[in-house]
Amino acid sequence: MNTLFDKIWDRHVVQVVKSGPTQLYIDRLYCHEVTSPQAFDGLRQRGIKCFRPQQIICMPDHNTPTHDQDKPISDPVSKKQVDTLERNACEFGLTHFAMGSKDNGVIHVVGPEKGLSLPGMTIVCGDSHTSTHGAMGAVAFGIGTSEVEMVMASQCILQQKPKTMRIRIEGQLQQGVTAKDVALYLMAQLTTSGATGYFVEYAGEVVRNLTMEGRLTLCNLSIEMGARGGLVAPDDVTFNYVKGREYAPKGEAWDEAVAYWRTLKSDDDAVFDKELIFKAEDIEPRITYGTNPGMGIGITECIPTEGDANFVKALNYMGFKAGEQLLGKKIDYVFLGACTNGRIEDFRAFASIVKGRKKADDVVAWLVPGSWAVDKQIREEGLDQVLEAAGFQIRQPGCSACLAMNDDKVPAGRYAVSTSNRNFEGRQGPGARTILCSPLVAAAAAVTGVITNPRTLLR
């Protein structure tokens, strides 16, 4: 009667503190440059080393520029953070995927594509979108800097066990509807706090039919519903994706791993604390109109006509009016990338719209692969030629305009149609106005210069 979450969690319990938290063993810790410096300093102050350094992977991504990565970083703060991570990794004997190396990119893209994130694992990182790795059939969640230090020192963490929720999406997605649209739909239905305190398992026909990239996108956005994390039961889609990757098991170890991974599913009689069912036919391509990811509508719908004080404040910030439709609204920037939509499937989708068309003259477009491996695949498939013929340039891997901790900042008052995960005030630059969407919607806006239903451009 166990859920998938229960099976993985229980297997990793070291001890349960009476009337307190669980001591949970962690299989993989990812470290980036923003949330790790204080954790390393804490180890130094206590005169201790990392307990299991082979299970810790370090990689800069938030501050890395998306151009001229072969040159010194011009921003002194970004340079200090990136350099500090490299020094810390060297001092503590940790694997470090340096900026500009073939192994670098966004940590939540690189982990799965290198086979570092595997079914059945517990995975943490000082970053809320660690929930991405749950798509592999893992229990993955973001932690704070003090907890990063805890894992470095002991390979364990103290956690209260979350409640469980299963969200089933049944039916078949319609034309132009992607995993990103499904996630934006769920956020609008549940609100940004509707899954608070839960770990969500995604299930149903839609989820079974998603590619690995689509599942990674869906789990990435779990945190935006308030969930502790999200996961998908591993199946043949997962195994085919993982097989042959650099850090994946090989030979007999592979066969043994798959045999275990096939047991990682919720029992038929498993009881969840909450269950929700949605219909695929109710989901169309979506966009956001406000300043949190749950403030979204179908692309043909109108902004709600009324709301609370936060609703009014959000519309004032965005320059929109209650009841209006956003189709045809002029936009200024388009961003394709982030740990949400920086994978090869996302570039294929974007290219499918822009092929044979031209970028709108007054649109600035940032197309940022999630890793150097994605960049390589883009070029092997000739997508770079399609994009360049349409007037687009491919930038170098990094978090880029997702959170504007590098040079990729949207100017105040400008509208950015973005495939990233958050549209908070100032998220993409002070005063920037962010409209979240899928790669298809982003591509349609990039070639028309206005918010456009991608279905009208799909061949």
Image (tube, rainbow, N blue to C red):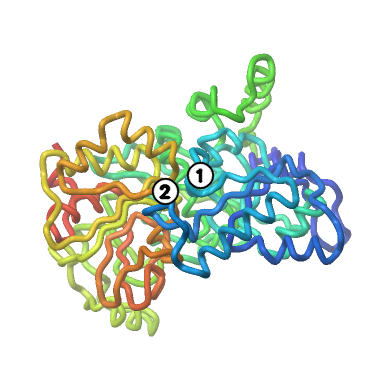
In this rendering, does residue 282 appear at all? no
Q: Which mark is residue 397?
A: 2
The C terminus - image quarter: top left
Q: Position of residue 242 (x, y in %)?
A: 54, 28
In the structure shown, which secondary structural element does the residue marked by tag 1 occupy?
A: loop
- Number of labels in the image equals 2
In this rendering, does residue 227 appear at all? yes
Q: Are marks 2 and 1 in contact (CB under 8 Å)?
A: yes
**Left or right, 20 with reference to 249:** right
Instruction: Please tell me which residue is depicted at 52% across the width and 39% down the height of the picture.
Output: 103
Task: Name the amino acid, label 1.
Answer: Asn
Q: Position of residue 162 (x, y in %)?
A: 67, 56
Quarter-wise, where is residue 66 in the image?
Answer: bottom left
Residue 399, placed above or below residue 109:
below
Instruction: Please tell me which residue is depicted at 31% across the width and 50% down the height of the picture.
Output: 367
- The answer for how far apart the CA atoms under marks 2 and 1 are is 8 Å
Residue at label 1? 104
**Left or right, 284 with reference to 133:** left
Q: Which mark is residue 248?
A: none
Q: Position of residue 347 (x, y in %)?
A: 31, 41
Is the residue marked by circle 2 packed among few (<14), some (14-19), or many (20+) residues within 10 Å? many
In the structure shown, which secondary structural element does the residue marked by tag 2 occupy?
A: loop
Task: Name the amino acid, label 2.
Answer: Pro
Q: Nearer the viewer, residue 426 or 326?
A: 426
